[in-house]
Amino acid sequence: MTKLTELNIASARDGLNKGEFSATELAEAYIQAVEAGRDLNAYITETPDVALERARESDDRRAKGAHIGAMDGIPIAVKDLFCTEGVLTTAGSHILDGFVPPYESTVSANLRSAGAVMLGKANLDEFAMGSSNITSYYGPVKNPWKAASGSDAGKDLVPGGSSGGSAAAVAGGLAMAATGTDTGGSIRQPASFCGIVGIKPTYGRCSRWGVVAFASSLDQAGPMTQTVQDAAIMLGAMSGYDPKDSTSANVAVPDFEAAITGDVKGLTIGIPKEYKMDGMDPQIQALWDKGIECLKAAGCNIKDVSLPHTKYALAAYYIVAPAEASANLARYDGVRYGLRVPGDSLDDMYMNTRGEGFGDEVQRRILIGTYALSSGYYDAYYIKAQKVRTLIANDFKAAFEDVDAILTPTAPSAAFALGEKQEDPLAMYLNDVFTVPTSLAGLPGISVPAGLSADGLPLGLQLIGKAFDEATLLNVASSLEAAAAFNFKPDLFNSKGGASS
Amino acid sequence: MSLDKDTVKNIAYLARMRVSDDKLEPLAGELSAIMDWVEQLQELDTDGVEPMASVAAMALPQRKDVVTDGNCQAGVLKNAPDREDGFFTVPKVVE
């Protein structure tokens, strides 16, 4: 029999249904894997007791013939940005020291109702701000992959970010799947870096209620999984209208898994010429070309499209997101929860608490946002960026009149070594060059592992879909996944690195 | 450099965030580099373009103006760093 920790959601579901193993056995296998894999620092808080209790409940449901949810008995990691009742929730920040929410986020509650078993809270960049999981107060996460050759051979690599702990946990076999959140690429880029699937659904598909807010007009939760089919199963369990989130979309949730038919003949896939950036890594271009060939072979029509304002997306994002963050993070005041650093006056206490509680990157973004929103600059920066955002959304609207999905690379490179790009915030921001436009337009995007770099590291391709058309997106992604046949796993026990198939 | 030390000090105060004096200069450099890079947005003609505040093409939902939650004082106060007699406490603000 396959090792329990090598199963995915679909195959574990089959095994559980057939009674080949119990949810408790599955949870126990993963709890052991989590302990053995602590070196990756993928989890901030492990919750083995919660996992065993929920696994037992799942086994009881099966024994009684009660209703079985879509994720019943499936062990998952929950990004530590989702509030979980009675379980420490940190957002990767010192300022939330000791915060134990008295409530549960809608998405994690939906997963729990679907029977999912929580293994723990996954590490992340502080307040989800970062692209390599190095800004976490709880330390960096290591990517389970290692380069077999090149200048980074054998070094510890970043898992991407901000959902770096989630991605590393899934890639390293420390969770069967995980929740992530994506504001500018925080699900898709780490999925690409770790060789897994990650989908950011349409803005409004998953409730933001109970998710620690970064930039409210962009934040979206989504699943990070081993396969596209798993992503479809888990997205269905996470989604749904929630009156507690005023931007939650009151639209039906289709059966995403059933939408994966394997038939994509006659669909038109757009290739945006503006994503062919100057100085693009030839390996990324080659991977993109391979993806085009895969979809052609599956019967798709390929069409060049233009998204003319692409080059302005990152700059607009780095006004809009920090501006919203500076407003959202105003709530951390040392009064109601988390860290308090005493001061002589109320102002003094605020300043000490926020000065000590926020890390460097979060402080930078709060300062940029405060500046962009301050009197005299509001129109020049914030309103201007919002106007550019309209232009970017219109680009996609026009392109989607002619195509069913758009194919691009997910990230401009493979995972890089821990410590690289750390001193230059701008160089780090460029990681999200291919993912940010989708976020600004609120569209769904999925990263599918599609190949290995010359140094043996995973590379992902991104498919972008129409608003609320995750069904088509997942179907195309599944065809791409089948054709790309990425059957590699990180070789955790080979210190020289490399991949095994 | 678009942001100098004093500007950083001022916005740090607006954000109620203590930034030590020795960090003001490097921060001014980093923030200026980001803002200079953002300047490229000015190349674009956006006259007559509506600013996008939300991607959701819908009106904010309304609900009945009734109490939907409450009687959870202990839960609300549970995570407070300091509390007294059912209240949050802060340093003295009135002399």
Image (cartoon, rainbow, N blue to C red):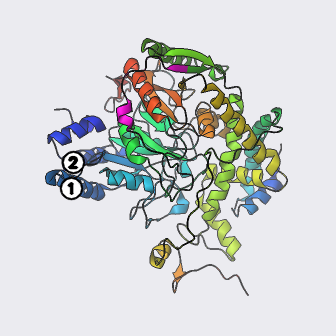
| Dominant secondary structure (helix, strand or loop) of the stretch shown in magenta | loop
Query: Are the residues under badges 2 and 1 in a single subunit?
Result: yes
User: Is residue A399 located in the magenta-colored stretch of the structure?
Assistant: no
- Can residue A490 be seen in this snapshot? yes
Residue position for label 2: A23
**Pointer 1 indicates a residue of which chain?**
A
On the image, the x and y values in percent for residue A139 come to: 48, 49
The quadrant the C terminus of chain A occupies is top left
Vertical placement of A444 versus A400: above or below? below
Residue at 46% x, 78% y is B71
CB of mark 2 within 8 Å of CB of mark 1?
Answer: yes
**Would you call the spot at circle 2 few (<14 residues within 10 Å), some (14-19), or many (20 or more)?**
many
* Secondary structure under the numbered disc 2 in the rendered image: helix
Q: Which residues are magenta?
A: A254-269
* Mark positioned earlier in the residue sequence (2 or 1): 2
User: Is residue A265 located in the magenta-colored stretch of the structure?
Assistant: yes
* Secondary structure under the numbered disc 1 in the rendered image: helix
Amino acid at circle 1 = Arg
Q: Is residue A147 left or right of residue A318?
A: left
- Can residue A8 be seen in this snapshot? no
**Pointer 2 indicates a residue of which chain?**
A
Vertical placement of A175 versus A105: above or below? above
Q: CA distance from mark 2 to mark 1?
A: 7 Å
Amino acid at circle 2 = Ala
Out of A271 and A80, give the one closest to the viewer.
A271
On the image, the x and y values in percent for residue A37 come to: 33, 43
The image quadrant of residue A332 is bottom right
On the image, the x and y values in percent for residue B45 come to: 83, 33
**Would you call the spot at circle 1 few (<14 residues within 10 Å), some (14-19), or many (20 or more)?**
some
Out of A120 and A110, give the one closest to the viewer.
A110
The image quadrant of residue B35 is top right
Residue position for label 1: A56
